[in-house]
Image (spheres, rainbow, N blue to C red):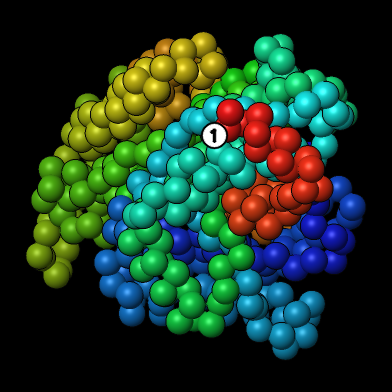
């Protein structure tokens, strides 16, 4: 589907509500290609969110408000006192459902137009309306015209019938309402939602990876979400409720230390792969509940790595099993891009290659200019990707598709209706 770019000068804001941090980027479109620069950033430790779910409305609202204010202050010169109104927000992978749908519409020999494509997508949307879920993405994957497969761009072609394979993402209505409540209480309107792994992929993948088949795995604090791209579009996404915070919890329990100390040990000394020197290298583990750190409590580094590695392996094994069950086979591709805050544990890439049996690289945002160094790493891939989504892929928003379908003349509508129903 053709990508519709935002006009030059448009201000866009992305709000990424995660289990370990909340981040906001304010960007401005700088050219007619939809590229933009980041003007303001804000981020802070998450409050009131666990494993991608809001568990305390007031705490989450306060954290969101604080984050957005930080970004507004940084972008103050451009915003000239106008408060931020509209944001695009991530839909956590644990609340998103991925499903395929195939739709056929009558063309009756005329040239296929934008409206015919929208008509097919709208028909697909009608077929999966359900009570507890809201449709978030309608992504056309491939087209068939009169039985001819593999057509990527049908506009301008002629035929009798057009079939469209559509990838749809729906979100859990209850979880979305809770998230929307926190955001609306902060006097912000949600312009669009974007599934977290989709945003991460849009931020990190190069065009060839999207085309040839690639899986992006976004390892966050409480959730690991992943998406498969093929033919330039996302064809599948899923998530598991495990992430970096679970590794930290394991360390805290295994070494009997506080969560804060466990996180520090993970960052300073952690690795997902054992090495020859781990037995001899000693690390000092503060004991739980002891205020004064009187005498050092030395343990071999191998003990720490022996706690991290099994959990990291479990995450990769679960992702591999879900991908196998998806039935996508070869379309998954030989390449994996790891991103997200917890992807930065040393050795994780090598472990991923071993468990997944694929080429693995680490990914960080590549499509933004003006991104400060502090927020240019893998931990901010989803936030960056939300801006890319709004700039380049907003034509996949279900409401826009419905709003822009033109019914055509009365005679055309009657002819199509008779053909489709008789």
**Residue 241 x/y as whole percent:** 29, 44
Report whether 249 appears left or right of 347.
left
Report whether 160 appears left or right of 186.
right
- Quadrant of residue 387 in the image? bottom right
Report whether 403 appears left or right of 43.
right
Local secondary structure at mark 1: strand
Residue 256 versus residue 362: which sits nearer the camera? Answer: 362
Residue 234 versus residue 408: which sits nearer the camera? Answer: 408
Q: Residue at x 52, y 50 (%)?
A: 136
Q: Residue at x 51, y 11 (%)?
A: 330
**Residue 304 x/y as whole percent:** 23, 37
Residue 22 versus residue 240: which sits nearer the camera? Answer: 240
Task: Find disc 1 in the rendering and name its residue.
Answer: 167
Q: Quadrant of the C terminus?
A: top right
Does the image show residue 93? no
Q: Residue at x 81, y 48 (%)?
A: 409
Image: 89 above or below 34: below
Report the label total.
1
Image: 242 above or below 62: above
Does the image show residue 75? yes
**Residue 127 x/y as whole percent:** 48, 41
């Amino acid at each position: 589907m053709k990508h519709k770019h935002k006009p030059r000068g448009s201000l866009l804001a992305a709000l990424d509500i995660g289990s370990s941090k909340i981040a906001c980027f304010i960007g401005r479109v700088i050219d007619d290609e939809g590229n933009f620069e980041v003007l303001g950033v804000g981020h802070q430790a998450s409050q009131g969110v666990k494993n991608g779910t809001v568990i305390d409305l007031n705490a989450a609202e306060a954290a969101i408000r604080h984050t957005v204010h930080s970004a507004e202050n940084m972008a103050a010169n451009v915003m000239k006192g106008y408060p931020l109104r509209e944001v695009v927000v991530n839909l956590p992978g644990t609340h998103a459902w991925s499903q395929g749908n195939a739709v056929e519409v009558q063309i009756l020999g005329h040239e296929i137009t934008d409206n015919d494509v929208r008509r097919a997508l709208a028909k697909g949307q009608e077929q999966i309306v359900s009570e507890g879920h809201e449709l978030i993405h309608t992504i056309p994957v491939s087209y068939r015209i009169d039985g001819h497969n593999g057509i990527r761009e049908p506009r301008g072609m002629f035929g009798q019938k057009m079939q469209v394979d559509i990838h749809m993402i729906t979100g859990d209505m209850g979880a979305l309402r809770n998230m929307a409540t926190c955001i609306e209480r902060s006097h912000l309107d949600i312009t669009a939602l974007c599934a977290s792994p989709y945003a991460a992929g849009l931020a990190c993948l190069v065009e060839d990876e999207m085309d040839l088949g690639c899986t992006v795995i976004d390892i966050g604090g409480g959730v690991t979400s992943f998406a498969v791209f093929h033919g330039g579009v996302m064809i599948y996404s899923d998530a598991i409720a495990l992430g970096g915070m679970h590794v930290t919890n394991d360390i805290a329990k295994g070494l009997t230390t506080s969560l804060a100390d466990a996180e520090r040990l993970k960052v300073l000394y952690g690795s997902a792969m054992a090495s020859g020197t781990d037995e001899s290298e000693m690390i000092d583990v503060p004991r739980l509940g002891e205020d004064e750190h009187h005498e050092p409590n030395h343990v071999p580094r191998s003990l720490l790595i022996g706690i991290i590695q099994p959990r990291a392996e479990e995450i990769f094994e679960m992702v591999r099993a879900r991908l196998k069950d998806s039935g996508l086979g070869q379309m998954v591709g030989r390449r994996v891009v790891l991103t997200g805050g917890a992807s930065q544990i040393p050795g994780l890439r090598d472990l991923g290659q071993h468990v997944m049996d694929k080429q693995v690289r680490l990914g960080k945002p590549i499509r933004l200019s003006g991104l400060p160094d502090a927020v240019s790493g893998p931990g901010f891939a989803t936030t960056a990707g939300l801006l890319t989504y709004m700039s380049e892929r907003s034509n996949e928003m279900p409401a826009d598709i419905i709003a822009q379908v033109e019914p055509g003349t009365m005679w055309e509508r009657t002819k199509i209706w008779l053909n489709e129903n008789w």
